Image: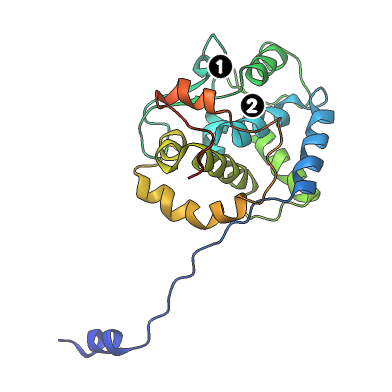
């Protein structure tokens, strides 16, 4: 056995530290929603980016690639085609119908602030950049702010409906991925605020996953 291998085997191992995510506080959530509400008409693209991340758990890349023909005609959610998700599988993402209808009515075929979208795109990449910059100004401290919104969504789903449903909606390759990334975060979410504007509804989960959800039982 080479000496280098023996040295590694006998040497002190450095344990990798996993990032611990903390749920946002009540003031930050309320300040964020107040800011977004005032921004709806001024910059609806940024508002849409927030809704997709906080109410649907979209990854930033999925938001940047989103096209209008992904949006279901009944406003129930968005179908991400095969090959465009992280695991390559197609995924349906449910969204609050009133908010998705607002996005369609105010962004599709509309002249909006700083519109740099390519034809057929819902928001594009620059709106995501503006969202991240403004969320940091409000007090969001994560390295990937939009991903923290996805974490917030995923933790709500896992708390209401369990890790299996969360894994399905987030598009994870298996439930072990969900468990590894959300086990610590769930402990913080139990004491975190969930405001009506972005909360996950059990009925919505049932309609999109065909799984009966007991809202009285937390994961």
x%, y% of residue 146?
62, 43
23 with respect to 137 (left or right): left
Q: CA distance from mark 1 to mark 2?
A: 10 Å
Residue position marked by numbered label 1 in the rendering:
68
x%, y% of residue 37?
80, 29
109 with respect to 4 (left or right): right
- Residue 171: image tag: none
Q: Secondary structure at mark 1?
A: helix
Q: Quadrant of residue 55?
A: top right
- Residue at the location (35% across, 31% down)? 89
144 with respect to 25 (left or right): left
Q: Quadrant of residue 149?
A: top right
174 w.r.t. 55: above or below: below
What is the number of callouts on the image?
A: 2
Residue placed most toward the observer, 54 or 136? 54
Residue placed most toward the observer, 44 or 201? 201
Residue position marked by numbered label 2 in the rendering:
123
205 w.r.t. 191: above or below: above
Q: Secondary structure at mark 2?
A: loop
């Amino acid at each position: 056995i080479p000496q280098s291998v023996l040295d590694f085997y006998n040497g002190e191992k450095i344990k990798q530290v996993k990032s611990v995510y903390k749920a946002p506080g009540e003031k930050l959530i309320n300040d964020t929603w107040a800011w977004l509400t005032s921004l709806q008409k001024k910059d609806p693209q940024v508002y849409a980016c927030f809704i997709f991340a906080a109410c649907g758990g979209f990854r930033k890349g999925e938001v940047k690639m989103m096209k209008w023909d992904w949006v279901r005609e009944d406003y129930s959610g968005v179908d991400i085609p095969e090959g465009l998700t992280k695991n390559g599988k197609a995924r349906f993402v449910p969204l609050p119908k009133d908010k998705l209808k607002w996005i369609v009515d105010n962004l599709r075929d509309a002249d909006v602030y700083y519109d740099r979208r390519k034809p057929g795109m819902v928001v594009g990449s620059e709106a995501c950049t503006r969202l991240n910059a403004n969320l940091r100004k409000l007090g969001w401290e994560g390295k990937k702010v939009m991903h923290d919104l996805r974490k917030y969504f995923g933790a709500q789903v896992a708390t209401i409906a369990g890790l299996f449903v969360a894994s399905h909606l987030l598009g994870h390759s298996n439930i072990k991925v969900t468990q590894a990334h959300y086990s610590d975060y769930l402990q913080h979410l139990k004491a975190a605020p969930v405001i009506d504007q972005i909360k996950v509804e059990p009925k919505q989960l049932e309609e999109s996953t065909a799984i009966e959800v007991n809202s009285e039982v937390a994961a």
